Image: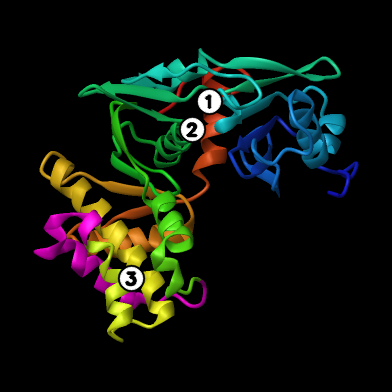
Amino acid sequence: MPSPPSPESPATALIALDWGTSSLRAYRLDPAGRTLEQRHSPHGITQLPVAGAEGFVQALQLLAGDWLAAWPRAPLLACGMVGSAQGWREAPYVAVPSDFAGLAGRLVTVPVGSGRTLLIVPGLIEHREGLPNVMRGEETQIAGALALQAVDDLGLIGLPGTHSKWARVADGRVVAFDTYMTGEVYAALSQHTLLARTLERGGAFDEAAFRRGLETAQSEAGRRGPLSTIFSTRTLGLTGVLTAKAQADYLSGLLIGHEVQSVCRTLGAELQGQAWQLIGDEQLCRRYQVALRHAGVEGVRWISQATEAGLWHVAQAAGLVAGRTGLP
């Protein structure tokens, strides 16, 4: 149970939540948008203490109930899967191209008790080539990246994760994005297929094995696609080339390599000379930096604290907190 705030705790201007599928993060921000405190719990939307709306209320109280009591006037703002059809209340998608003031104008409210409401940031949707694409939570991270960099154009932003996103940002707007299920495919292959019989997850990062996977993805054999090359994870183990532990990082490099090759092939020429950014877990982003350098993309930057910065600036754009009412 978190320790209650002391009487000397600094003023809180916003209580911000990043509420995903498997976890919940809470941030307490001061009037300048600085993070005073952050907390984490496993109560994502699929891991609630009890089912239904009461489960969301309990999860919020367990993690930040003392904050709500100590700062009863601080607005509550959330992003992520809490606004999905399976979440607390659905926040309908906003079509791209969209700026972040547009998102701020489409916040959805849900009562949380004691006369307070939670506002939820909507996600983004794109209809392209007959295939709809969506994101929830990443749009707020992109807003944070724009604010932290104080620019309108960020070129291409990669957001590695279970479902990696690659978003093109120009004139302060997300104009297009793509999704790659790389993380989820890796988890499924390494835990629930034939590969799992010889592959051993965990342990220190084997960069040599990871780079070997990148090389395979970029090779002539890689042109046959991941459905062909994935099996090499097993055969390289059977022939003694890769140890059980090395197979895990080889598979990681192989899948990330195929993803990066696809991004470079479809967007590389269009974005030549523009900046490439990464947002997400630092260790995972380091793998993507290695993969991008291997593909010839240099100077890729990792942006930290994008989620809390994005929630703060959406709150500003919505007039929930004092300061500017627009984003960079």
119 in magenta: no
Q: Of the numbered discs in the image, which one, if any, rests on residue 220?
A: none
The residue depicted at 83 percent of the width and 24 percent of the height is 72
Q: Which residues are magenta?
A: 202-228
Q: Judge the density around disc 3: few (<14), some (14-19), many (≥20) Cα neighbours within 10 Å.
A: many
Marks 1, 2: nearer the viewer: 2
* Dot placed on the residue nearer the N-terminal end, 3 or 1: 3
Question: For this rendering, which residue is in front, 157 or 320?
Answer: 157
| Residue 217 drawn at (x, y percent) | 20, 62
How far apart marks 2 and 3 lie (CA) works out to 32 Å
The reply to whether the C-beta atoms of the residues labelled 1 and 2 are less than 8 Å apart is yes
| Kind of residue sitting beneath label 1 | Val
**Residue 190 sits above or below residue 169 on the image:** below
Q: Which residue is mark 1?
A: 314
Q: Is residue 299 visible?
A: yes
* Dot placed on the residue nearer the N-terminal end, 1 or 2: 2
